[in-house]
Amino acid sequence: MSQKQFQQFGKFELELGGSLPELTVAYHTYGEMNKDQSNVVWVCHALTANSDPAVWWDGLVGEGKLFDPKKYFIICANILGSCYGTTGPTSVNPETGKPYYYSFPDVTIRDIVNSFVLLRKHLGINKIKMAIGGSCGGYQVMEWGMMEPQVIENMSILCSSPKEAPWGVAIHSVHRATIELDPTWGQETKEAGIEGMKRARQVGLLFYRNHEAYNERQKEESENVTQYFKVSSYLKYQGDKLAKRYFNPISYYKLTKVLDTHNIARNRFKTTDEALASIKQKTLIIGIHSDLLCPISEQVHMKENIPNCEYHEIESLFGHDGFLIENEKIAESIKGYFEFIK
């Protein structure tokens, strides 16, 4: 399935002030929407993914999988600020005729969801049977559930939280500081900061996995190794891998700032507990017991405050990345909780 694009010619107002002169949202769809729209599944992606979940979540999306396009109309849109088709730092600013680069404005999770709402309306979707996402995809699902409770009927939220914790902001601050150390950072090119981004990705991998995972999968075969460690090569490979799929350093930098804005209570409720208590959708929270980035305490807290909610915890070696890897366990949890998923 090829990528599609929705365009809005006219100002797109932003939560923190200012606007974009126009907006493009890249998206993929699979399957056919039925007449009563009871088979719509909207997948929200994480930080550096794209709008094609059949690629990055192929254990759950595809023929014969949990979300089979023969049964469901599956849609995923690339997030605002990314570099995979939706308006972001590498997009051309129509007012200048040049790429935005560093001038791309600060956006929030709410802005991202507002771009989804425009796409939803463009496609004539009035009901979403399930919105599902992991990590910052879960941020989008929660925000959307708050913004349009009449549209989002059910939510599956994996390895996520109702607001960005100081722990997360600290990690993102280190990501950005690492990119800023790249001597090319600040140059008006797509490649500026690429080496810094590779190293920031290496920092991220310390939190996407965990102590046990590294000890199990990156251990040396010999007790006599004193240099050229296996784990060092692994981290370098992961940084290079992100660069090879043409992720842009300015997008990476800006999107970590987007994560820091996440708070479903902002300008709505005095506390996140009050915000969680207002959620009416049937909600499934899935946590990975070894998650360092978004510890299970965050998910348990959500379960304790969302009225119509169930929490499932998955045992996994893979930490935060478990939501992209433990597909069979995730599918079992979702099928066991939502009666409409067969």
Image (tube, rainbow, N blue to C red):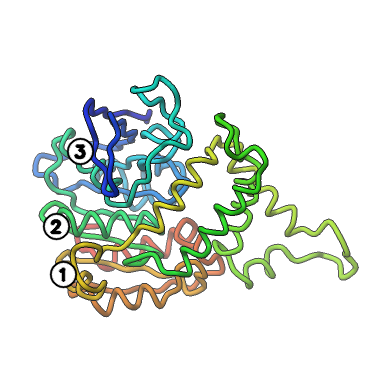
Q: Residues within 10 Å of mark 3 (few under 14, many from 20)?
A: some
Q: Residue at x 30, y 37 (%)?
A: 30
- The disc labelled 3 sits on which kind of residue? Leu
Dot 1 falls on a residue whose secondary structure is loop
- The amino acid beneath tag 2 is Pro
For this orientation, the residue located farthest to the right is 224
Q: Residue at x 34, y 66 (%)?
A: 163
**In the image, residue 202 lies at what x, y percent?**
63, 54
State the CA–CA distance, disc 1 to disc 2: 10 Å
Q: Which numbered disc flags the more N-terminal residue, 3 or 2?
A: 3
Q: Indicate which disc residue 18 carries.
A: none
Residue 190 position in % (x across, y down)? 55, 31
- Front residue of 223 and 94: 94
The mark that comes first in sequence, 1 or 2, is 2
Which residue in the structure is indicated by mark 3? Answer: 118
Local secondary structure at mark 3: helix
Q: Is residue 156 above or below residue 179?
A: below
Name the residue furthest top.
Answer: 97
Quarter of the image with the C terminus in it: bottom left
Q: Residue at x 68, y 47 (%)?
A: 237
Q: Is residue 20 above or below residue 173?
A: above
Quickly name the residue at label 1.
Answer: 278
Q: Quarter of the image holding residue 225?
A: bottom right
Residue at numbered disc 2: 149
On screen, residue 39 versus residue 16, left or right, reads: left
State left or right for residue 82 relative to residue 247: left
Q: Quadrant of residue 1?
A: top left
Marks 3/2: CA–CA distance: 16 Å
